[in-house]
Image: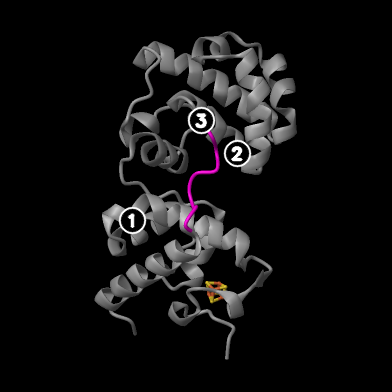
Amino acid sequence: MESLEDRKERVVRVTRKLRKALPDARCKLTFQTPFELLVKTILSAQCTDERVNRVAMDLFKKYPGAKDFAKASQDDLEKDIQSTGLFRNKARHIRACASFLIEQFGGVVPPSMDELIRFPGVGRKTANVILGNVFGIPAIVVDTHVMRLSKLLGLTLQDNPEKIEYDLMKILPKKDWISFSHLLSDHGRQTCIARRPQCRRCSVEKDCPSSLVS
Ligand code: SF4
């Protein structure tokens, strides 16, 4: 069985190799302000980042800031974000988040996990997106790709995103927390594709216990 020290060394190798293979790995949601990224992260549930970026262009023209979203009607906002799916809940959460931000924080997104998870509909994943990409605070975003690949790479046995996050925290150097999520997400989209992992052209094949290369 692999020791914790060996796993730590392996994850450093995996990070180095993925970084070389994916030099442009980063957050795919574009944003001008912390609040914009908060809204886009809510919209990105079960929707592609590309679609969210497209929909958000018109959305932020119509509602430039948190006050505008707080004043928006539920019906209007639902129509505006319909194509991102799950639009009723998303509209409800965005309006509630905008009001909460203004009432509790004077419109300034706080750089704190404890504060961010108090926002309506915001869990650790969304909070970590904000902490890492807006504030540069070490944070591991566990999305669907990070969940799947962490298990394939033998970095966790857990299925729960929060437990996976804590397992990764134990083995990853803190300086790599933000970029590791981006690397696994991109690797999951491009190479370690859910239904057909491309192990033969995978840059971390030698360090992966799930490799299909014999
Ligand atoms: S070797 Fe295969 S299973 Fe392992 S990370 Fe690469 S593509 Fe995925």
> Marks 1 and 3: CB-CB under 8 Å?
no
Query: In this picture, which residue range is highlighted in magenta?
Result: 23-30
Q: Residue at x 56, y 10 (%)?
A: 68
> Marks 2 and 1: CB-CB under 8 Å?
no
Q: Pointer 2: what residue?
A: 44
Place of residue 34 in the rendered image (x, y in percent of width and height, measured from the top left): 43, 27
Q: Residue at x 64, y 35 (%)?
A: 52
Name the foreground residue: 129 vs 166.
129
Ligand 1 within 8 angstroms of badge 2 C-beta: no
Which element carries disc 2, helix, strand or loop? loop
Query: Which is more N-terminal, label 3 or label 1?
Result: 3
Tell me, yes or no, whether the highlighted magenta stretch contains residue 71: no
Q: Amino acid at mark 2?
A: Ser
| Front: mark 2 or 3 | 3
| Residue 61, quarter of the rendered image | top right
Q: Residue furthest bottom?
A: 214
Q: Residue at x 74, y 28 (%)?
A: 82
Tell me, yes or no, whether the highlighted magenta stretch contains residue 29: yes
User: Is residue 53 placed above or below 144 in the rendered structure?
Assistant: above
Place of residue 92 in the rendered image (x, y in percent of width and height, measured from the top left): 60, 23
| Front: mark 2 or 1 | 1
Quadrant in which the C terminus is drawn: bottom right
Place of residue 141 in the rendered image (x, y in percent of width and height, measured from the top left): 44, 48
User: Mark 2: few, some, or many residues within 10 Å (few <14, many ≥20)?
Assistant: many
Q: Report the disc number at residue 176.
A: 1
Magenta stretch prevailing secondary structure: loop
Q: Is residue 17 left or right of residue 6?
A: right
Q: Report the disc number at residue 31.
A: 3
